[in-house]
Image (spheres, rainbow, N blue to C red):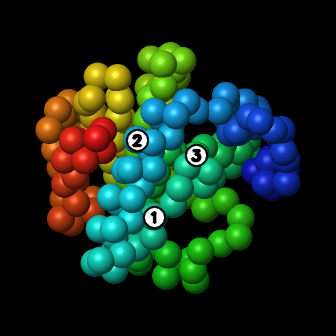
Amino acid sequence: MTAQELLHYSHEPFRTELIAGRLVEMEPAGALHGAVAARIGRLLSNHVLAHGLGEVFGAETGYVLATDPDTVRAPDASFVTRERVEALGGIPNEFWPGPPDLAFEVTSPRDRRGEVQSKTRSWLQAGTRAVVVIDPRRRTATVHRPDGSVVSVSERVLLDDVLPGFAPALADVFD
């Protein structure tokens, strides 16, 4: 399957991603997952809009990370810089061509560790500058960088190098 075919594909109630041309179905998320994803999206949006830094995208937004065969993945929340949006001429109707600058993944009880690691690797290999994996059950976040560094966080997520001034307290994400 190609990214273009996926754009017009519907297989309710499952969300889908495309990995190396292969369709992967994902079960609907639970309520805690959805609440945490919405909170991080709100915090991200408030900061980005207040400072005119770019665009924030919600959980259903697909990013084309590779072509031939195509890979299209969707984080739980993401950010793309204003410069990249302007270079593209605005927000496309299709999937975003390339990775976000910042991706957030919220884990669910059903998620397997290897799947989360694989998705994180996909983002970083495609050029995402930081991936934040949020674990609502443990109330922690882990920041992954392209250089291989991984920092576990229990109080505040520091992302100044990717998104200046954005350092949300985890208490605001979980409560």
Image coords of residue 26 (percent x, y)? 67, 30
Q: Which residue is mark 1?
A: 56
Please name whichever residue, 8 or 27, is drawn nearer the observer in this view of the structure: 27
Image coords of residue 9 (percent x, y)? 85, 47
In this rendering, the answer to whether 67 lies above or below 50 is above
Q: Secondary structure at mark 2?
A: helix
Question: What amino acid does circle 2 point to?
Answer: Val
Numbered mark located on residue 36 in the image:
2
Residues packed near mark 3 inside 10 Å, few (<14), some (14 to 19) or many (20 plus): many
Image coords of residue 105 (percent x, y)? 44, 39
Horizontal placement of 25 versus 81: left or right?
Answer: right
Residues packed near mark 2 inside 10 Å, few (<14), some (14 to 19) or many (20 plus): many
Q: Secondary structure at mark 3?
A: loop
Image coords of residue 5 (percent x, y)? 85, 50
Figure quadrant of residue 107: top left
Q: CA distance from mark 2 to mark 1?
A: 16 Å
Q: CA distance from mark 1 to mark 3?
A: 13 Å
Residue pictured at 58% horizontal, 32% vertical: 29
Question: What amino acid does circle 3 point to?
Answer: Ala
Mark 2 or 1: in front is 2
Q: Which residue is mark 3?
A: 74
Q: Quadrant of the C terminus?
A: top left
Please name whichever residue, 29 or 18, is drawn nearer the observer in this view of the structure: 29
In this rendering, the answer to whether 141 lies above or below 67 is above
- If you read the primary sequence from the N terminus, does the residue marked by circle 2 or circle 3 appear first? 2
Numbered mark located on residue 40 in the image:
none
- If you read the primary sequence from the N terminus, does the residue marked by circle 2 or circle 1 appear first? 2
